[in-house]
Image (cartoon, rainbow, N blue to C red):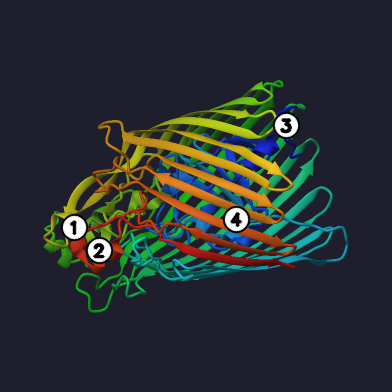
Amino acid sequence: MNTQLSRPGFSFSKIAAALSCVLSISVFADDSIEVIEVQGHTQNNHQLVGSADSLLSDLGVDFSAAGGVSNLPVMNGMMGDRVKVLVDGADVTAACANQMNPPLSYVSANQISSYSVVAGVSPVSSGGDNIAGVIRVNTIALEFSDTDSLNWRAGYVTAQYKSVNDSQAYGLGASLTSKQFSLSYQGSFEDANSYDDGHGDRVLDTLYRVQNHALTGAVRDNKQQLVVKLSHQKIPYQGFPNQYMDMTDNTSYGLVAQYQRELTDSHLHVQVNYHDVKHEMGFFSAEKTGMMPMNTDAKDYSYQIHWRTDLTKQSSLMLGQEYYNYRIDDWWPAVAGSMMMGPNEYININGGKRDRLGAFAEYQNQVNQAWWLSAGVRVEQVTTNTGDVQAYNEGGMGRMGSMMHMSKTDAQAAMEFNQLDRKRDDTLVDMSLLARYQLTNNDELQFGLARKNRAPNLYERYSWGVGTMATTMIGWFGDGNGYIGNPDLEAETAHTLSASYTKLAKDDSWQITANIWYTQVSDYIDAEVTKSFNRTDMAHTERNILTFTNLDATLYGAKLAGLVELHNSKQAGKWQLKGSLTSSHGERDDSNEDLYQIMPLNTKLSVEHEYKGWQNALSWQWVDSKTNVDERRLENKTDSYQLLAISSQKTWQNLTFKLAITNLLDEYYQQPLGGVSIANYKQDMSKGFEQLAGQGRSYNASISYRF
């Protein structure tokens, strides 16, 4: 029942294939609901090991710097929980006050079979509780054979090395199949030191080690299919240069069960998810020292029931009911002999709860050969709550509080917090309208209008500490500031309008796509300065403590992408030129002040060549200087920069070998979305909070063998 509507003369399959590695807008069928999105497919996913950032960057996703395992995605100028990331349809919450374990950190690139990005106007069936867009990453790619007996299907082994951080990564996969049964394993391991910047200096505290494992089994007959995936991740350590803490352990176990059944003129999809994580923060390296443990235990439970039926040959209706249950405990053990971190353990979130109950209806109709429409409504009830909390020291200010002359201590803040009625309910109503108009066989217009909502996360709402040490442990922004929660935060409501135009050459030799978008957000969760602190007597080491607050904000931008076939012959192979240009802006409505971490104007160009098993590419990226910064967060300005990269890949039957040089000219640059280097600051406070530098030149090699 998963049919895709098509029209003569306009080849969407060719568009998707051509734009799988550049920013663009294309049509992608997902649960038979066609939406405006960009999408990619990793036909040779076994050749990549490590972070999935590079795959999604090719589809226009920016990233706010975090750890080496996975950064935080940024879409249309918005980051964090505003971007919904679904791995195999599962909605996993970042269980950390610094979001050190975001959903993308639980999957390695070699495990990914397909991925898609819906920026801004996403249909209600793609998921709620987000305002920036939806990223879908799929690792379940089932294969079956023609025999009744279970036999070996395929396997691979991959090894990868990067000189910039001495990274060694390995991937392994294997599968057994029959007509009715499929069993596969995907695993990865990576170990990396801290990387060097363009000056040859080490960027402190960027080292990490990680392993991921996934075992997937499926059974089917002519009408139904059941899939069960078990996953496990172990991160013994991971440095976070722009946070005051590091990760000293992240151990997780997950289960995804999917059931599908074909009915008469309809399709049923049921999914159940479970994810358990034990997360610890502290210090493990001389590159950033300290003594303070922080522990987090969290669990995600959820189910989704989706039913789609064909109303006519041209129209269908999808109904869905979903439930998400999140539980978290966040506590900081006392440090023996410490005047500030004791004698009690600090209870940050005690039995935190975040429940979402939602339902949606989505209708699509191929009105005629020119017009296609989709409309949907989604309603969610979000309930949050948490138990009583406790400060390190219940009897007084504590050393840091006295030193900073705080008007309120953590002990007082805990007492006031415990007296509150902390239960909060948010009703979210999402609506989406998507339209596509076929001007000619080679010209298409697409429009999208959406109202989307996001309820505050538990840290935005329930981080109660007010002291310098406590507040600087809260925040996923990498800015060196401290944050205080606000139980009275309202849910964010975003109204987004987007439009795109695609022109395709009659002979498919070139294509261009232009996209513009505009978002107005009511009750945008930002922050206001409450007080400041300074650990030295130098002005450039001052930081702020901010309280989460609601305000109105406006974000808008434009994207231009295209490709052209330069040459194609048996003698010289296929040559293509691809490019994209992106501009975005975000500001507060009340003051026209800039929002935090908005990516400056940037462009990408690449020349790609394919010939008899060879794949070669030369790419250039230019990023403009960042001058629009958030003064409240003391955001740094950055200079413009450009990066060159070159790669060459050769495949001999089942063996693939790849060589690449990134940052070919070894240019020094500071990441516009990198935040500040707290690791450098702790080594030498006289330098203040410098912007985090990017990676210098790296010589990369990988070899992969399928068997």
Give the percent coordinates (x, y) of residue 353. 44, 54
Q: In the drawing, what numbered circle is on residue 273?
A: 4
Residue drawn at 63 percent across, 49 percent down: 609
Instruction: Give the mark nearest the N terminus, 4 or 3.
Output: 3
Badge 1 marks a residue whose secondary structure is helix
Mark 1 neighbour density, 10 Å: few (under 14) some (14–19) many (20 or more): some
Q: Nearer the viewer, mark 2 or mark 4?
A: 2
Q: Residue at x 71, y 64 (%)?
A: 184
Q: Position of residue 176 (x, y in %)?
A: 77, 65
Q: Residue 541 bears which disc, if any? A: 1
Q: CA distance from mark 1 to mark 3?
A: 59 Å
Between tags 4 and 3, which lies in front?
A: 3
Q: Is residue 234 above or below residue 351?
A: below
Q: Are marks 2 and 1 in contact (CB under 8 Å)?
A: yes
Distance of label 2 from label 1 (alpha carbons): 9 Å
Measured in 3D between alpha carbons, the distance from the residue under mark 2 to the one under mark 4, in whole angstroms, is: 41 Å
Pointer 2 residue: 681
- Residue under numbered circle 3: 5
Of the pair 561 and 4, the residue shown nearer to us? 561
